[in-house]
Amino acid sequence: MVNAQEAEGQGKISGRLVDSKTGKPISYASIGVLNPDNKEVNGTTSNEKGEFSIDHMTTGSYKVAIFYAGYKNKTTADIQIDPAHSNVNLGDIQLINGETVLEGVTIVGKKSVIENKVDKIVFNAANDVTSQNGAAIDVLRKVPQVTVDADGNVELQGNSNIRFLINGKPSSIFGNSLADALASIPANQIKSIEVVSSPGAKYDAQGTGGIINIVLKDNKVKGINGIVNASAGTLFETGSVNLNYKNNSFSMNAFFSGNAQLKARTPFSQDRTSRDPAANTGTHLMQDGYTDFERHGYRTGLGFDWTLSKSSALSGSLSYNNFSNKNTGLINQQQFITDYNTSTVTSIIGSRTTDNRSSVHSVDGSLSFRKTFQKEGQELTADYVFSFGSPTTSYFQTQSLSGAASPYNGISGNNPGTDNSHNLSVDYVHPLNENVIFEMGAKTVQQHITNATEVHVLNTTSGQYEADPLQSYHLNYDMGIYAAYFSSKLKIFNWLDVRAGLRYEYTTLKIDFPNTNIPSYGLLVPSFILSHKFESGETIKLSYTRRVERPEYTELNPFLNISDPHNITTGNPALKPEIGDNMELGYTKNFANGGNISLSMVERINSQDLKQITTFYPTFTANGTEYTNVSVTARDNIGKEYNSGGIISLSLPFLHNKMNLRSNMMVFHRYIMSHTYVGNLDMGMRYRLNLNLNYQFPKNFILEVFGNYNSAAKNIQGKNPESITYTLAGRKEFWNKKASLGFTITNPFNKYIRQVTTVSTGDYDSYSVRELPYRSFGISFSYKFGKMDFKKEKDMSNEYLNGPGTGS
């Protein structure tokens, strides 16, 4: 019986926590069991009566460390579990009111908001108290090396081709509308955001800009716990509920979140001139009016972790995503056509109504198996990830002459589709010794996209909208990716850490669309990171990686959005993948007080560079229907781009950690070599600067000021606008830090952000102004219930991203 007990780990440690003065029980305190090396091996929390019990303890020597806010941390003397002492009751353990630091023991200490690791930057949003309002897009504005403009367009180190993941897994929601997807994830559900600018061979090669992984909150505390969040404001509203359950070997979490961007009006104007050399005519088009935009959505799902044995575990997740947006407007139009042959001017004065909508419903799921071996670090994992998405885009517009009783032109388009994918991967890690680790694996991705475009045109005689078979079509798109990799981690001369690998991906493509054929292709993806960490906390590194940007669903979809018949947008099913070669030389210094500073020099070279191109057509024919004075915008492969720059990021605490200053500055120079459109072009410099300052006041109140500046950026056909945003936020915690109340004020002195965009293509010049509503006021409330957090500080080798474990 004794041997069986030892083998199964039936030892037990129990006790009761009480206040040293009053003798009252202390509930929901965090208790950790530590081995002789002060590593946490088990843990729990005390119940309502202050009692705790930790089962499944194997033979050995342990200490019990206790942490509870408002009390001095406490650690017990060595506790021996053996056949003669399998059930140890510590009795009443008295805690003294007042906080101290537990010497020699690391337990539940808060991580820095920003962690600079060798292969990634981690922004711990859960530890940034004012990141709890808004959505994921708002948190991204604070993340080092990331740029977000006023419209929600995201760049990483100056590149917009980013692979977005949720908990290390792909999702179909990102393929339809990135802005909608990022607006659908409440900020208060985000644990951290991981930025991987130089991914290793184990990572998928997709995304020339790199990888951004959004890690959602969970809780590994034994028992039942959860958190409720709600926010309301003049522009945004969110609400979410998270529930967690854990026993000895099984844990489950469930969540629901909803969000809404309230209807807001955006004034708009465009002044454009164009010339038709063949007909010797010129057109001057002036448009002014407004659009009303609103967005809403929700996400729900559940996940589980099941420890099958000491060496194997199974985990899985299933989520449902639903969000949509609507953009309606009224535009006044004045068009003057000059015939230079006769010097006559013809005018068309009227208005246009528009209604644009898009939505996506998707189901994402994953199942992961993990097997460890007796050798420390040896591990086998298998993952299956699937996603079923149903995106839909539609538009409706009419044009009327001034004073006319009925429209002279009208068209509607509906574009339902599907976006389904299956990912299967197997990875194996084998350490030869403490200095050499080999990793290898294989993966396949199968994606199937369909859509059916239906277009109806107004019959001005009958007043009915009739199907137009010439503009309606069906599209089928199949992509298969077959990948394998080998990588290694080793230390040379006990000084240089080397991570090097090679990945091969073979991509097959099949597009069922007229005159479109993209051949299959293979791609070798080498990568390496050379680094050295000094005893003073400084790290230097040199990295290189090759990446690929395969076009997404909306970029490939040839659906013509004719909600504005003078400014048509469409996709391009003939796009080729963009290839990126990225190099980075970096320096990081970590300070003892939790501060850090990071300096990076970056060179990014994109071949078959994907850019948005606007082409002017005096007459544009779309499957038998003719449109006049039209600009058509779509993405195309334009040549090669060189993006060179420097990045400075810092996080510095002051005044005994009561004040914290965080800042991030990026400067990039772009140069384009194109054999089409524009030729060689110096794009000039771009700047991004943000500043975050917060101060911790007494009684758990914190105040923050955050400002962000994005400079205007030259593009290959004009210029994109600059933007300046600033936010004041605060949060007060109460009810023993279980509840909090916060406020957020954004751009209080400017109702709009004025965006001026210019486009020039020789025979076409456009000057557009948008007044984007940005001023907002909001409040938020959060409440935790159940057990308090008790978390390990150790990174797991396969936590979230399917990449190698990294130290700081």
Image (tube, rainbow, N blue to C red):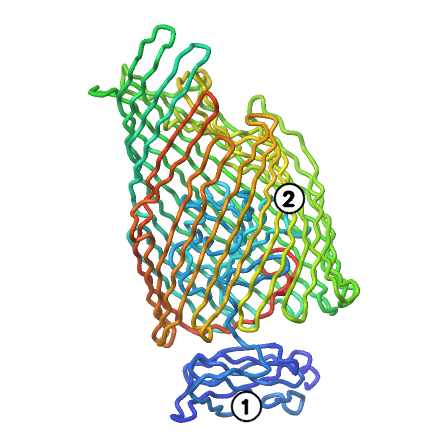
Residue 76 image position (x, y, % from top left) = 56, 89
Label drawn at residue 150? none
For the N terminus, the quadrant is bottom right
Could you tell me residue 406's position as x and y percent? 23, 20
What residue sits 47% from the left and 29% below the top? Answer: 633
Depth order, front residue of 382/741: 741
- Checking the image for residue 547, the label placed there is 2
Q: Residues within 10 Å of mark 1 (few under 14, many from 20)?
A: few
Q: Is residue 755 left or right of residue 444?
A: left
Q: Secondary structure at mark 2?
A: strand
The dot on residue 89 is 1
Q: Mark 2 or 1, which is nearer the eye?
A: 2
Answer with the quarter of the image where residue 767 lies.
top left
Q: Amino acid at mark 2?
A: Arg
Q: Secondary structure at mark 1?
A: strand
Cα separation, mark 2 vs mark 1, equals 57 Å
Picture quarter containing residue 433?
A: bottom right
Above or below, 87 against 128 in this view is: below
Position of residue 103 relative to residue 488, above or below, is below
Where in the figure is residue 585, as x and y percent of width and height?
65, 53
Q: In the image, is 233 to the left or to the right of 182?
A: left
- Specify whether 326 is left or right of 69: left
Q: Residue at x 64, y 39 (%)?
A: 579
Q: Residues within 10 Å of mark 2 (few under 14, many from 20)?
A: many
- Side of 529 where 791 appears, left or right: left
Outermost residue, top direction?
A: 342
Give the residue type that dot 1 points to.
Asn
Sequence-first disc among 2 and 1 = 1
User: Is the residue 545 above or below the residue 728 in the image?
Assistant: above
